[in-house]
Amino acid sequence: MTAPLRVSLPDQKLVEALEPAAGVEFFVWDFSGPAPAGRLDIVVPPYMRGPEVLAALESVEIGLVQSQSIGYDGVADVLPAGCLFANAAGVHETSTAELALGMMIASQRGMADFARNQATGTWDNRQRPSLADRRVLLVGYGGVGKAIEARLLPFETQVTRMASREREDAGGKIFGIDSLYEQLPLHDIVVVSVPLSEQTKQLVDAKFLAAMPDGALLVNVARGPVADTDALLAETSSGRLRAALDVTDPEPLPADHPLWTSPGVLITPHVGGASSAMFPRMVRLIKQQIGLMLEGKEPVNVVLGGPSRS
């Protein structure tokens, strides 16, 4: 008799959504107590907990860690040897792109000002910048960047795509990051969606911001440390640049931090993927991984790990 596939999930809601399946045994483990005894073929950690929680896996025999996030910065430092780690590609891109587009529209059309004016009964109907006809630079062209592009094009924007290396696809040229400082001055809106790494940490620094034209909008849906907060504060406080930020450094942003009240800055509390679309998509991904492993096939979205990890 074949041993069942043993899957740990962080809450009962996921267990109920996945439903009983032949050859699969579910456990609830939220990492706050001891791990279930024995090997775990798939472990799904709690959402929005830092990579440090994976230290709890050190003494557990595990096949696959299935994250609920796209990003995996810091995971390689704590992932036990022999473990596979899969990210949640396909789960968050749509919601993050929705938020990025919404923040662009809100920033361009002055929605935050209108909300404040409504509270005071102020009628201010002066002209605001459009999103239409704006030149938008996408710094980062992975799943999130592609989803943002798909939503921007119907708004009649001019989109330039930039990835780690230059290449061509059906949509034309994708610039390499080595063209960054040539492209920044040419764009009204710059959207950053790169993963956090040693190469991208504080990519958005004083030099980056200085290269953006006056009045330009920076949108950060990547990770907080991708941007230099002090440099960003200096540019927005002066009124030269505007920013729409779903991520900040530090995070959470302290209540008394000057970035909250800097002119032209719109902040959301790292909720790019936190929409009603997340849960059913996460359930589908876990079901897919279970099905693949039951068939003896390789799981999808594996970004780290394996027997040879050093």
Image (cartoon, rainbow, N blue to C red):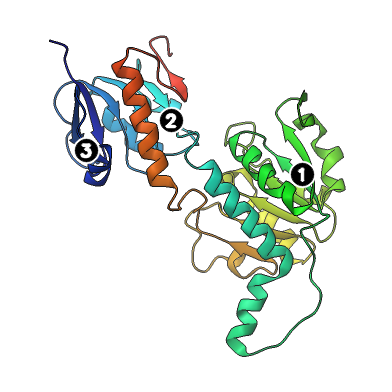
Residue 108: image quadrant is: bottom right
For label 3, the crowd category at 10 Å Cα-Cα, with few meaning under 14, some 14 to 19 and many 20 or more, is many
Q: Quadrant of residue 162?
A: top right
- Circle 3 SS class: loop
Which residue type carries mark 3? Trp
Side (left or right) of 286 relative to 19: right
Q: Residues within 10 Å of mark 1 (few under 14, many from 20)?
A: many
- Residue 8 vs residue 37, the one in the foreground: 8
For the question of whether residue 87 can be seen, the reply is yes
Query: Which residue shows up at 23% across the image and 37% down it?
Result: 19
Specify the label residue 75 is tagged with.
Answer: 2
Q: Could you tell me which quadrant the N terminus lies in? A: top left
Q: Where is residue 101 in the image (x, y as percent from the top left)?
A: 65, 54
Residue designated by label 3: 29
Mark toward the viewer: 2 or 1: 1
Q: In which quarter of the image is residue 307?
A: top left
Mark 1 highlights which residue?
Answer: 137
Kindly check if marks 2 and 3 are in contact, taking CB atoms under 8 A apart as contact.
Answer: no
197 in relation to 49, above or below: above
Q: How many labels does the image show?
A: 3
Picture coordinates of residue 197, whole percent (x, y): 58, 32
Name the secondary structure under disc 2. helix
Earlier along the polypeptide chain: callout 2 or callout 1? 2
Q: Do the residues labelled 3 and 1 touch (CB within 8 Å)?
A: no
Q: Where is residue 282 in the image (x, y as percent from the top left)?
A: 39, 39
Figure check: 274 above or below 194: below
Could you tell me residue 21's position as x and y percent?
21, 29
